[in-house]
């Protein structure tokens, strides 16, 4: 991605730059280097918003939120997930809407908010994912539904949701 970033920079392709910065940030996040991840993802979000690339901006916001979750900064993560959802909704970017809804649900569960709202968000994300179809969205959505149901004491229902997840 860094080589591709250099090419985009040389060409002045700001939309490509935003995408590459986000990809590099996600890689660093996956490697556990959250400082570098945040540096790249914050730049990706800024460039994407400057160029009007709402899809890349939504992706960067949700990915940055995931990095904040890794760091245990759930409130900051929630704000980024909500920003990503707003950007994705404005752009009708269903994939990013599903991601954002799922991670908003997880963040609410993580901070101990009442699980009912998280359950509804996870269900909404799962339904969108089924309509697309988006296998990873279905799996994550059902897992987060199961977690919310478990927090509500509805363990049999939770087990049923998790067991109904498709197996690739």
Image: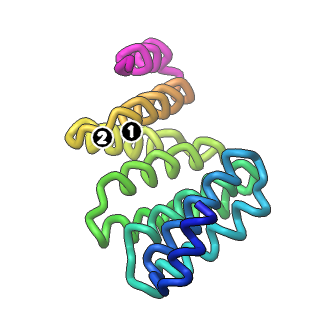
Circle 1 sits in a helix, a strand or a loop, which is it? Answer: helix
Q: Quadrant of residue 127?
A: top left
Residue under label 2: 129
Q: Quadrant of residue 39?
A: bottom right
Query: Relative to residue 127, is residue 56 drawn left or right?
Result: right
Please give the name of the residue rendered at 47% of the width and 61% of the height, measured from the top-left corner: 59
* 44 is within the stretch colored magenta: no
Above or below 11: residue 123:
above
Residue under label 1: 137
- Give whichever of 56, 106 is nearer the camera: 56
Rendered-image quadrant of the C terminus: top left
Mark 2 or mark 1: which comes first in sequence? 2
Q: Which residues are magenta?
A: 153-168
Circle 1 Cα neighbour tier, 10 Å, few/some/many (<14 / 14–19 / ≥20): many
Q: Is residue 80 visible?
A: no
Please give the name of the residue rendered at 46% of the width and 71% of the height, measured from the top-left corner: 57
Measuring from the top left, give residue 3's x and y in whole percent. 60, 65
Contact flag, marks 2 and 1 (Cβ < 8 Å): yes
Please give the name of the residue rendered at 46% of the width and 14% of the height, measured from the top-left corner: 159
Circle 2 sits in a helix, a strand or a loop, which is it? Answer: helix
Rendered-image quadrant of the N terminus: bottom right
Query: Relative to residue 85, is residue 5 drawn left or right?
Result: right
Measuring from the top left, give residue 128's x and y in whole percent. 27, 44
Measuring from the top left, give residue 76's x and y in whole percent. 66, 64
- Determine the CA span between mark 2 and mark 1: 5 Å
């Amino acid at each position: 991605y860094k080589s591709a970033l250099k090419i985009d920079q040389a060409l002045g392709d700001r939309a490509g730059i935003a995408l590459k910065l986000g990809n590099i940030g996600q890689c660093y996040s996956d490697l556990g280097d959250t400082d570098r991840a945040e540096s790249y993802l914050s730049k990706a979000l800024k460039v994407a918003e400057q160029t009007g690339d709402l899809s890349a901006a939504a992706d960067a916001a949700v990915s940055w939120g995931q990095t904040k979750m890794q760091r245990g900064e759930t409130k900051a993560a929630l704000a980024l997930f909500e920003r990503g959802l707003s950007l994705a909704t404005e752009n009708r970017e269903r994939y990013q809407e599903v991601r954002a809804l799922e991670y908003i649900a997880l963040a609410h569960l993580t901070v101990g908010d009442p699980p009912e709202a998280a359950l509804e968000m996870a269900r909404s994300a799962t339904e969108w994912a089924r309509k697309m179809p988006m296998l990873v969205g279905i799996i994550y959505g059902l897992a987060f539904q199961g977690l919310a149901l478990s927090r509500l004491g509805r363990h049999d229902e939770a087990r049923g949701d998790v067991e109904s997840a498709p197996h690739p």
